[in-house]
Image: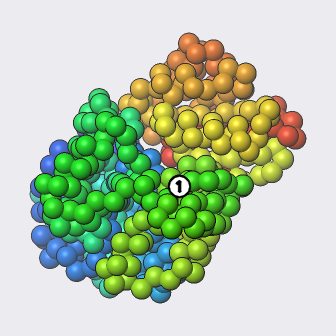
């Protein structure tokens, strides 16, 4: 039987395995048995490299990429596992910023075809095991592992990391993780391991006790980044913070825009400090360069990504209440009194009421959808938005929506493409 091509392999992975991005909650397995079984079949590759585990509602992707960039700058061979991808499946699995080889994806898929047919893992479960195998074969010094959904039952939660990180907690995937902040925090706190330090990026009155209780039960040292670094200001991509322990001010030029980096950079700094104490050699210049060169080092996309100046066109994967709130604050700061054009598409398993109620009525709206089964129908989104006074037309494809926005926008207007990763992925 001939070996499949890479394209045939990707079609098989996307079409044959239950995939959350395509079918939603039906692909979410509420235990780790499949991941454990595949890893055992592979000889438990996750045990052969050091790792950092990153969870959270918002910011976990940015923090993961920042960490990988810093470790690369420090000279460490660094693996990075994130999800979802935007353009290329292999964006999920990188070593020193380079995509996993196509040949490896093919060989791994063939190698695991038997156990895949036996236990029917989800797309995510198999992809996580693929990343572990790739990092083991690549002999990475460290791998940054971002959770997919939740934490406690997330497929990535079979590692024994050097450090756990929880960026923040807000409402997202409530149908699977819980309908209160406390319930969601319990799921995310499931990545806290025995005697393994944990960093909390942001906490709330409802979530802090959950983290403290779990850390105490696991005898894990816990650090809250917000008690160590205070955000002072930012201008474009330049951020200023106060070290609350020394009174020293620190300046960082961030490769990632977005006001929300005021939370992510302190989380990164707190994490790096713990890793330095554990013996990892990371210099001040490595941190500065890692923050500044994060896009070049890791290939991250879709975080306040400006692709044109006049009119300004910005891509951002903000897709929940807190994410949109941060984006709106940024628009007010960077583009006061500008006419706004929102190109939006979401998935159909997210409640949008709290998100839509934040959006300005005096903006122009362009409703669209990604070409995946989980996409919310653009006409349905238009109908929901109309209930909040948000008026606009429906477009079958995000590129049609962008073309219309460009035609309607003046030179000083701002066009924001936001919502689902999968909408941004379909931009030409």
Residue nearest the observer in this picture, 184 or 140: 184
> Residue 198 vs residue 407: left or right?
left
Numbered circles on residues, count: 1
Residue 37 visible in rendering: yes
Residue nearest the observer in this picture, 263 or 391: 263
Q: In x, y percent, where is residue 317?
A: 54, 46
Q: Please, is residue 93 above or below residue 405 in the view?
A: below
Colour scheme shown: rainbow
Question: Which corner quadrant of the image does residue 136 belong to?
Answer: bottom left
**Quarter placement of the N terminus:** bottom left
Q: Residue at x 77, y 46 (%)?
A: 312
> Residue 140 vs residue 94: left or right?
left
Q: In x, y percent, where is residue 366?
A: 66, 29
Instruction: Classify mark 1: helix, strand or loop.
Output: strand
Question: Which corner quadrant of the image does residue 356 belong to?
Answer: top right
Question: Which corner quadrant of the image does residue 34 belong to?
Answer: bottom left
> Residue 379 vs residue 127: left or right?
right
The residue that label 1 is drawn on is 230
Q: Residue at x 28, y 77 (%)?
A: 50
Q: In x, y percent, where is residue 209?
A: 25, 43
Q: Residue at x 86, y 36 (%)?
A: 410
Q: In x, y percent, where is residue 174?
A: 32, 33
Residue 426 visible in rendering: no
Q: Please, is residue 70 above or below residue 238 in the view?
A: below
Q: Residue at x 27, y 36 (%)?
A: 182
Other residues around mark 1 within 10 Å, as few (<14) / some (14–19) / many (≥20): some
């Amino acid at each position: 039987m001939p070996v499949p091509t890479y394209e045939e392999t990707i079609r098989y992975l996307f079409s044959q395995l239950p995939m959350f991005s395509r079918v939603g909650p039906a692909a979410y397995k509420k235990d780790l048995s499949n991941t454990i079984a595949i890893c055992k079949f592979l000889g438990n590759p996750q045990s052969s490299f050091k790792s950092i585990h990153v969870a959270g509602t918002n910011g976990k992707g940015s923090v993961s990429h920042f960490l990988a960039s810093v470790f690369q700058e420090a000279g460490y061979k660094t693996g990075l596992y994130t999800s979802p991808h935007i353009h290329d499946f292999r964006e999920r699995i990188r070593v020193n910023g380079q995509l996993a080889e196509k040949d490896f994806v093919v060989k791994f898929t063939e190698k695991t075809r038997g156990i895949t047919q036996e236990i029917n893992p989800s797309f995510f479960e198999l992809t996580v095991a693929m990343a572990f195998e790739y990092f083991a074969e690549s002999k990475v010094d460290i791998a940054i592992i971002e959770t997919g959904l939740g934490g406690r039952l997330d497929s990535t939660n079979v590692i024994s990391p050097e450090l756990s990180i929880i960026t923040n907690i807000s409402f997202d995937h409530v149908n699977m993780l819980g309908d209160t902040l406390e319930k969601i925090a319990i799921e995310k706190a499931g990545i806290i391991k025995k005697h393994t330090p944990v960093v909390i990026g942001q906490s709330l009155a409802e979530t802090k006790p959950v983290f403290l209780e779990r850390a105490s039960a696991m005898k894990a040292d816990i650090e809250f980044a917000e008690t160590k670094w205070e955000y002072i200001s930012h201008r474009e991509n330049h951020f200023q913070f106060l070290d609350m322990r020394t009174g020293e001010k620190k300046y960082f030029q961030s490769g990632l825009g977005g006001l929300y980096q005021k939370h992510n950079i302190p989380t990164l700094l707190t994490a790096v400090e713990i890793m330095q104490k554990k013996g990892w050699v990371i210099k001040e210049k490595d941190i500065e360069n890692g923050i500044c060169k994060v896009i070049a080092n890791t290939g991250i996309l879709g975080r306040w990504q400006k692709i044109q100046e006049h009119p300004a066109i910005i891509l951002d994967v903000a897709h929940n209440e807190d994410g949109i709130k941060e984006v709106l604050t940024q628009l007010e700061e960077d583009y006061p009194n500008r006419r706004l054009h929102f190109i939006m598409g979401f998935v159909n398993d997210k409640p949008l009421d709290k998100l839509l109620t934040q959006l300005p009525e005096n903006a122009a709206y362009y409703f669209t959808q990604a070409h995946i089964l989980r996409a919310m129908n653009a006409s349905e989104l238009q109908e929901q938005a109309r209930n909040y006074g948000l008026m606009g037309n429906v477009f079958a494809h995000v590129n049609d929506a962008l073309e219309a926005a460009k035609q309607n926008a003046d030179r000083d207007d701002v066009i924001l493409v936001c919502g689902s990763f999968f909408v941004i992925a379909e931009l030409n």
